[in-house]
Image (tube, rainbow, N blue to C red):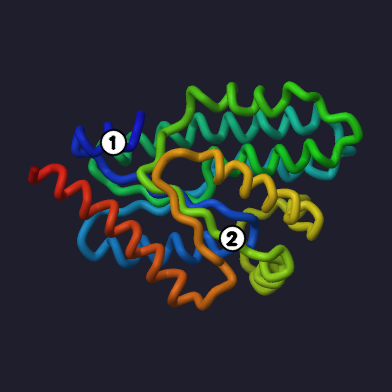
Amino acid sequence: MAGNENRALGLGYFIVLEGIDGSGKTSIGKFLENRLSEEMKVKFTCEPDDLQIIERLERIQQLPASAELVQAKALLFTADRALHTLKVMQWLQEGTNVICERYFMSTLAYQSAELQELEEPPEWMLRWLREINKPYIAIPDLLILLDSHPDNALRRLSERASKKAPRLPYYERPEMLRRVAECYDEEYRRYERRKLRLDADSEIEELRNRALMEVLKVIEERDLDASG
């Protein structure tokens, strides 16, 4: 379902935050949730979402790298997205605005980066990643990409290491994060809907305010369309 169609039906807004591990998605997402909840219904969520799938991913992430393993991970992430998108669509239909940390672009960025680590990655797999996810995607009203240098992202990750949050350390490596950042850059340039790119290494208050301003702009424009 496209974002503009959501608006025409009076549904909630769908805002997606993307970026490498440690780029500040959780911080920005919770800030937006707190600010927007003063005036509207808001739900902050993230992917992967299903705890059983997360546990399965944690168990297999140390297996030897192979195309088959990348496929298995992609299928698990896609299964998680299929279930999670059902929740997202229900929230939107109830008029709740949804802020999601990671979505479809994460699959393309991370699994593409994994493929690059293989000696002979199958040429068809990136196309396959797009195809298997097509049925399970709600189109965001706004996609925000948080750019961060891998060194800064890893520093943030080390600072939060003691917190009990689901993590997949396999991806938290300098070379992997560099590859993921490059894949995000390519996917962002390909993305043709409403988007915003922010320097995640800038001052946190500036970062939060710019994200909030863009979200409020999206809401204001919908209200103007509705009144017209």
Which quarter of the figure has residue 79?
top right
Residue 154 versus residue 54 in the image, above or below: below
Return the x and y of residue 102 as percentages of the image width and height.
53, 47
Residue 8 versus residue 194 in the image, above or below: above
Q: Is residue 82 left or right of residue 75?
A: left
Which quarter of the figure has residue 29?
bottom left
Of helix, strand and loop, which one carries label 1? helix
Q: How many marks?
A: 2
Query: Can residue 88 be seen in this snapshot?
Result: yes
Of helix, strand and loop, which one carries label 2? strand
Residues 180 and 161: in front is: 180
Q: Real-space Cα distance between discs 1 and 2? A: 26 Å
Q: Amino acid at mark 1?
A: Asn
Sequence-wise first label, 1 or 2: 1
Residues 42 and 147: in front is: 147
Q: Amino acid at mark 2?
A: Asp
Q: Which residue is mark 2?
A: 147
Return the x and y of residue 199 as percentages of the image width and height.
55, 66
Query: Can residue 162 be seen in this snapshot?
Result: no
- Identify the residue shown where x is 23% and y is 43%: 95
Return the x and y of residue 59 as percentages of the image width and height.
77, 42
User: Which quadrant: the N terminus?
Assistant: top left
Dot 1 alpha-carbon crowd within 10 angstroms: few under 14, some 14 to 19, many 20 or more: some
Q: Which residue is mark 1?
A: 4
